[in-house]
Image (cartoon, rainbow, N blue to C red):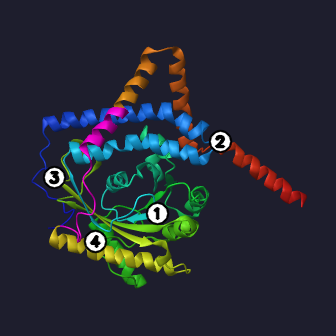
Amino acid sequence: MEACKPLKSDNNRLMHRPLTPIRILRGLLCLVVFLSTAFMFLVYFAPVSAVMLRLFSLHYSRKASSFLFGLWLALWPFLFEKINGTKVVFSGDMVPEGERVLLIANHRTEVDWMYLWDLALRKGCLGHMKYILKSSLMKLPVLGWGFHILEFIAVERKWEVDESILCNMLSTFKNPQDPLWLVLFPEGTDFTEEKCKKSREFAAEAKLPMMFNVLLPKTKGFCFCLEALRGSLNAVYDVTLAYKHQCPSFMDNVFGVDPSEVHIHVQRIPIDEIPASDKGPAAWLTNRFKLKDQLLSYFKDQGHFPNQGTEEELSTLKCLINFTVVIFFTMIFAYLTFSSSIWFKMYVGLACVYLSSATYFNIQPLPILGCVQAMFYCKNNRSE
């Protein structure tokens, strides 16, 4: 069985589940719930956890933000696995909880990054995920604010611009006490047959391995991240994603028509096993994608990855409790916003102004204590 091969009818793409009126209504309701809960969590929690608390402690600000917004992110695995009924099958290595990792994954479709939340939720690291993503996603209404608060790294896909962006952001991620799952898609774009053909043509010219199920990875960003964080990382997680029977879009997820199954294969590589020489990490990454290409060929032939069943199913009870907590807070915030005093309306307005400007100009408050220490350090150096 081929993974992600589009099935077409005469007029429209054949979806795995029919798009019924009930699914349309349910999908629209889910969108309203997700956007309203995101908005209320951001305007009420973000100024406290990601601004005021951050002025005093970057570590505790991140802990608070990861916990609060992890509650909201957990709604997505709940949607995928419990509401839509998508079967998520894990295979490969059992990874421990609490590790600081660099996670690399293949990029099959626009929603790959969302299914990584299913793994992170099971490991208690959902709020600690930080993605390297294209800057245009920061312009999404409301969601872009969340990406900024969670410190996702927005890049332009131009190395002369992105190098300084990565350097500035990664310099704040080096504290071993801060949990971290930094997610990178080395292919740089989602997979298509046309892109794959161009990738093979380039590989032939550069005498690099030929790949048929993934694109040749861009190594510069990976090497930069690895070098910047190597001293504080435990491992690299090599994640391979595949879908039955076709790759889903975002709206497929919302309306629950696709996918029927998501297969996630995880391989844990201790950081000490990755070469530290100048060209070593680049060659290592290219070899990992060659292995990933072979793994996806196995999936096409067998319909699954080897060594399945490494993670348990999500607890329905825990998902419902989490959902109830999110809705409870949202209802309180909605009451304060629309039925309470003018001060709450002013607070919401100011919070919206701050979140919009902070996201647009990439404003991240610096801890006061850290600034004072830096000033004294510079002053002492000058006096010496």
User: Given this view, does label 3 or label 2 mark the residue nearer the observer?
Assistant: 2
Location of residue 36 in the rendering, given as x and y in whole percent from the top left corner: 37, 31
Q: Relative to residue 199, is residue 106 depicted above or below?
A: above
Going by the numbered disc 4, the residue's amino acid type is Asn
Location of residue 20 in the rendering, given as x and y in whole percent from the top left corner: 12, 39
Is residue 77 rendered magenta in the image? no
SS category of the residue bearing label 4: loop
Marks 3 and 2 sit apart, C-alpha to C-alpha, by 53 Å
Residue carrying label 3: 13
Marks 3 and 4 sit apart, C-alpha to C-alpha, by 22 Å
Residue carrying label 4: 213
For marks 3 and 1 on the same chain, the one whose residue lies earlier in the sequence:
3
Residue carrying label 2: 56
Q: Crowdedness of circle 3 by 10 Å Cα count: few (<14), some, many (20+)?
A: few
Residue carrying label 1: 101
Q: Crowdedness of circle 4 by 10 Å Cα count: few (<14), some, many (20+)?
A: many
Q: Residue at x 28, y 59 (%)?
A: 311
Q: Residue at x 32, y 33 (%)?
A: 324
Marks 1 and 4 sit apart, C-alpha to C-alpha, by 25 Å
Range of magenta residues: 304-326
Front residue of 371 and 202? 371
Q: Are marks 2 and 1 in contact (CB under 8 Å)?
A: no
SS category of the residue bearing label 2: loop
> Is residue 212 in view from this perspective?
no
User: Given this view, does label 2 or label 4 mark the residue nearer the observer?
Assistant: 2
Q: Relative to residue 49, is residue 173 depicted above or below?
A: below
SS category of the residue bearing label 3: loop
For marks 3 and 4 on the same chain, the one whose residue lies earlier in the sequence:
3
For marks 2 and 4 on the same chain, the one whose residue lies earlier in the sequence:
2
Marks 2 and 1 sit apart, C-alpha to C-alpha, by 26 Å
